[in-house]
Image: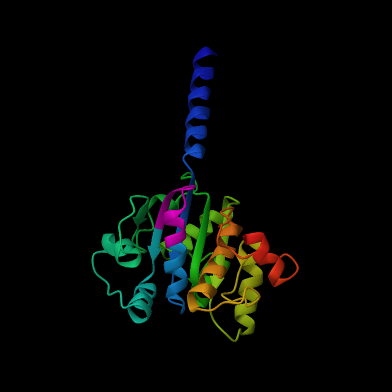
Amino acid sequence: MTCFSTAAKLVFSAHNMSESKGQIVTLGVTGASGALLAQKALQLLAEDVRVAKIHLVVTETGQRLLAEELNIASGDSKQLPVRLLGKPYAKVEVIPNKDVGASIASGSYEVDSMIVIPCSMGSLSAIANGSCDDLVSRAADVILKESRKLVLCIRDTPFSRVHLENMIRAQAAGAVIMPAVPSYYHHPKTIDDLVTQYVCRVLAQIGLKQGQMYRWTGSHSEAKKAEA
């Protein structure tokens, strides 16, 4: 009984230590247009002291997206965070999308949340229907089965019935469906204003509210006073 109690205390202590170190987040990037959204999400997560680890998984079409929209050519995957953010962050780990045996592919590995940004309709379909043929869909499947937070930042328009049914299926399974739709009530002046506000709303969904997020308080002038 004493040995069991000691072991239990060690497990409990290790769990508390893990929690105190901050969140572990998986960031999936697929081939839907919106590379700026992925870049901003990675930046805010990397700079957030509440985040201990970021597992970055980019699909093959996601790599093409980064090349087309950000001029980031594929190369050494380990250098991808530097090319996206301008400097290295030890907390960011790049995992190949084909590595379906990676840590995040198992429910026994503790990941607090996952964001797929942008999320293509193909990835949405795979996640909604449990077709785990790559790491992004498998990691998302694990998040759902373990009842953790999954945010799908879908990026396509218009939606077909197939798209809508897949959204309903994924949402019924526990995912948050968050289309990449910009807001305007904060009077954005630049594309970065639009991107930042949207990504801040996404991060709020996983419990990481950002200070720079504009919060509506009844009128634009009142919100500005609250920020000041």
Magenta run includes residue 105? no
Nearer-the-camera pick, 176 or 221? 221
Instruction: State the residue lying farthest toward the right.
Output: 218
Instruction: State the residue lying farthest toward the left.
Output: 76
Question: Where's the N terminus, which quadrant?
Answer: top right
Question: In the rendered image, which quarter is residue 189 located in?
Answer: bottom right
Q: Position of residue 160 (x, y in %)?
A: 61, 85
Nearer-the-camera pick, 184 or 228? 228
- Let me know if residue 125 appears in the view: no
- Let me know if residue 217 appears in the view: yes
Start-end of magenta stretch: 43-55
Question: In the rendered image, which quarter is residue 180 located in?
Answer: bottom right
Task: Indicate whether 179 appears above or below 10.
Answer: below
Image side of residue 164 versus residue 10, left or right = right
- Residue visible at 52% across and 23% down in the picture: 9
Image side of residue 44 versus residue 92, left or right = right
Q: How is the image coloured?
A: rainbow
- Residue visible at 47% across and 53% down in the picture: 25
Nearer-the-camera pick, 100 or 221? 221
Q: Position of residue 146 (x, y in %)?
A: 57, 50
Question: Where's the C terminus, which quadrant?
Answer: bottom right
Task: Indicate whether 36 appears above or below 11.
Answer: below
- Residue visible at 63% across and 78% down in the picture: 184
Q: Position of residue 130 (x, y in %)?
A: 54, 64
Magenta run includes residue 54? yes
Q: Position of residue 205 (x, y in %)?
A: 61, 59
